[in-house]
Amino acid sequence: MVLRARRTAFYVGLVVATTVLFTLVYNTGMAVWEGRPQPLYRSLEVVVQSFTTTGYGEDSPWQSPQMNALVITMQLAGIGLILTGVDVFAVPWLREAVTPSPPESIDVGPGHVVICAYTPRTEAFISELEARGRAYALVEPDAETARELHDEGYRVVHGDPESTAALENVRIETARTVVADSTDDANASIVLAARDANPDVRAITLVTDTDLARYHRAAGADEVLSPRQLLGRSLIGEIPTAVATDVDDGVTLGEDFQLVEMAIAEDSTVSGRRFDEIHVRERFGVNVIGVWTNGDFQTPVEPSARLDAGTRVLVVGDPERIETFREATEATVHTFPSQRIVLAGYGDSGRAAYEALARAGSHVTVLDLVETGRSGRIASTGDGGGPSSRDEGDESVGGLDPEMDMLDSRPDVSSPWGNDGPTGEADAPGSGVDEAADVVDVVGDARDPAVLDAAGITEASVLVLTIGNDTTTIFTTLIARELNPDLDIVARANDDANVEKLYRAGADYVQSLATISGRMLASTVFEDEEVLAYDKRINVVRLPAGSLAGSTIAGADVRGQTGCTIVAVERGGSTIHGFDPHTFEVGGEDELVIVGTDDDVKRFEREFGE
């Protein structure tokens, strides 16, 4: 709207200036070149007649070539102004007339989800909702964005989500949940408006500044989400020497049933052998769900597949039997030499990654654009070289960053969201890492080869990139890969669109913040579905039986139809596993624990969802 007003003002000014200029020149030309002086208003009339192509009256014909050239110029200028006017006025009007506008209200519910404001985070969440067949309504304050979303098929209305009237237009009185994903201060206002319209609605907010989480709860938010530290910790799970903690934790699906991802060590008894030669089920009593090879998840595992060093194996079974298989893979052998790890970016994600690495006893060199107090090695004498680790809203300098933590109103040290207290502080007492610790070793721009060299990139085995700007991360990946071809690069991506770019640039593993946020929202919103491992490269999800009720797993060809594996069934408060898929019949009240990639889980929900 502002751009259109500027264009209109510029066009009107151009018409006025052009008309005045040609009137003065024409009036002077009539007196000097034609010898026929006349009043200015007569010259103005001729100029307007020329611009509007209505004729020239008694002034024509002109005798001098100068006047004929001037009249031709006026004619061309008039045509140009008409065409410009069409573009400024007619085209936008026609576009608005033929482009469908988003509706003022949507008839949805009951039990739908109201999403306030559109961001890449909510885009991932909407994908989760659509995959589950759940109704939603999106309230977008920007008119142009709302129109574009409506054209793309989103269920969107244009309105101010801080307004009770706008929320009533999406039937918030019958909504199950409202998700506020605007700015931090606007989100608190949205919760207040939602409470006014429906005191019983469940309110979830996303917060950028973790210090403001308590104000969201004071406004009435039931949950305050921020996946930033989860992202930092999950990135560390991809480092071979730091994987022990991640492997030991696994995903517990019952007292005697666990899902674990582990790496094949180079000197293990299974390294380099074909999958069918190992006889995993017969020897170890565990089931292999799939393997990660060169960034691709393969399920089921081909009998001829080789389990080379570094291959990640996803297994399910009894914890004791998993431990036996772990010993064979040597995934948690403690004789690994301490690797040199370079951590670029010490914002909230970088801090969480550093804490995980410190607990694992890794040798870490921290590189950042800003010192934290200690006299770090200054690798660049310039102005810092631009947005190294704290760029365009990196959280560590107080800007708006898209990454977030989960700040539950009920702090729980065993919570999967992390050890953050109710105030959202990253380092709780007793965490073993001093929040004010001076940890930055090298100060400089991560895109500068000299800075990376000062951080020891050529001797390092792993580079962890927790930088707030994807463009900087991509360029740093290219430089680091050139400086050290054997380097393992683990990177964060703020935008899903940049994940593939980072892989092409040379990253070994990339985790998308939007995907983490979408899964976290899904885990928080759905009470009958639980995302058990949203920070991994595969989904571990608990879903109702749906249309599988009364069928056997093999008879429904679940893996063939969807690529997912049902690893457990919860029935009557107990967890059933190790069942025969050919004879075990799924009950209508059962809940299924399934494993698969994002696309596989979505196919499962489309195929067998209610």
Image (cartoon, helix red, strand yellow):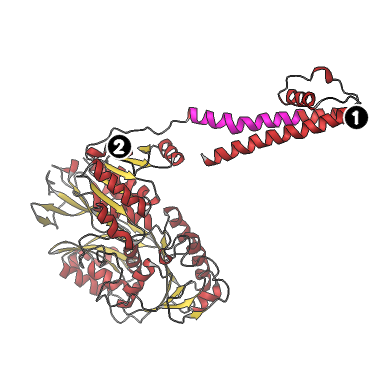
Percent position (x, y) of residue 35?
A: 91, 26
Looking at the picture, which amino acid does disc 2 mark?
Val
Q: Tell me if residue 182 can be seen.
A: yes
Nearer to the camera, 178 or 466: 178
Task: State which tag comes first along the sequence, 2 or 1.
Answer: 1
Q: Which residues are magenta?
A: 75-97
Looking at the picture, which amino acid does disc 1 mark?
Trp
Q: Mark 2 and mark 1: span between their CA atoms?
A: 70 Å
Q: Which residue is mark 2?
A: 170
At a point 34% along the width and 60% down the height, the residue shown is 404
User: Label 1's element?
Assistant: loop
Residue 423 lies in the magenta-colored region: no
Label 1: few (<14), some or many (≥20) within 10 Å? Answer: some
Determine which quarter of the picture holds residue 357. Answer: bottom left
Determine which quarter of the picture holds residue 424. Answer: bottom left
Viewport quadrant of the C terminus = top left
Percent position (x, y) of residue 139?
A: 35, 41
Label 2: few (<14), some or many (≥20) within 10 Å? Answer: many
Determine which quarter of the picture holds residue 608. Answer: top left
User: Label 2's element?
Assistant: loop
Q: Which residue is mark 1?
A: 33
Percent position (x, y) of residue 76?
A: 75, 30
Figure check: 551 above or below 437: above
Q: Tell me if residue 308 can be seen.
A: no
Tag 2–tag 1 contact (CB < 8 Å): no
At a point 12% along the width and 64% down the height, the residue shown is 255
Residue 92 lies in the magenta-colored region: yes
At a point 84% along the width and 20% down the height, the residue shown is 60
